[in-house]
Amino acid sequence: MLFESKNLKYGHPGQQPLMFPDITLQKGESLLVLGRSGSGKTTLLNLLAGLLHPTTGEVKLDGQNLAAMSGQKLDLFRGKEIGIVFQKPHLLAALNVKENLQMAHFFSKKKGQAVDHLLAELGLAGKAKASVLTLSEGEAQRVSIARALATSPKLILADEPTSSLDDENAYNVIQLLKNQASKIGAALIIVTHDQRVKTQIPNFVEVTGL
């Protein structure tokens, strides 16, 4: 099993603890995490990424228990093996598109995919030297996806990647994520409230916040 989470529970201070369904994924498999706003979807994504430590339970990626790691060891493991596509692209404005992807290699100390080839696959070859400040919303999102894929991670986590897109672009983004996950043998987890995505990824769990 490439990825699994078991018996996850997390308590925000002063609130009822959130309990989450178990997840198991093999290489190349995709999963939707569905739920309304405030149900705990983002909390779950942060637990799966090792950005939060669960109150109880465990998260394992390729046999490594994220909850048992901390500090620099966890940061390095996350940088190498987990690609995160945030809802809003967090790109470095001082760097051009290609340099933003190269930074992923630098921080993870992992060669990963060839940046020029990855940009070409995502339709961004002509934007390699462009300032990220000149990108359209859709282009910035694809650069964010490219950066998440740059290290050939074993787990790809995407937070609401279709929330601001029309039907055609939403479809294209999900196909892009699925195809890339399959190509590099990664598990893909998409956290969303967008019910349209169920037509492309029928495997899903629901987060209720209870």
Image (cartoon, rainbow, N blue to C red):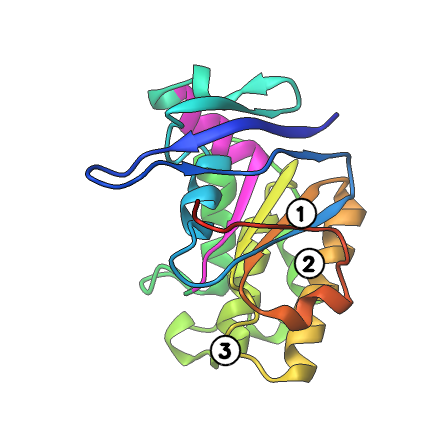
Q: Is residue 15 above or below residue 75?
A: below
**Range drawn in magenta:** 73-87
- Quadrant containing the C terminus is top left
At 25% from the left and 41% from the top, the residue drawn is 15
Task: Tell me the amino acid under the disc marked 2.
Answer: Leu
For label 3, the SS is loop
Q: Residues within 10 Å of mark 2 (few under 14, many from 20)?
A: many
Among the 4 quarters of the image, the one containing residue 123: bottom right
Q: Which mark is residue 164?
A: 3
Number of the front mark, 3 or 2: 3
At 52% from the left and 68% from the top, the residue drawn is 141
Q: Residues within 10 Å of mark 3 (few under 14, many from 20)?
A: few
For label 1, the SS is strand
Figure label count? 3
Q: Measured from the top left, where is residue 128 in percent x and y?
A: 55, 67
For label 2, the SS is helix
Task: Tell me the amino acid under the disc marked 3.
Answer: Ser
The residue beneath circle 1 is 188
Q: Measured from the top left, where is residue 72 in percent x and y?
A: 36, 22
Number of the front mark, 2 or 1: 1
At 47% from the left and 78% from the top, the residue drawn is 137
Is-magenta flag for residue 207? no
Closer to the chain start, of discs 2 and 1, is: 2
The residue beneath circle 2 is 177
Closer to the chain start, of discs 3 and 1, is: 3
Q: Nearer the viewer, residue 26 or 184?
A: 26
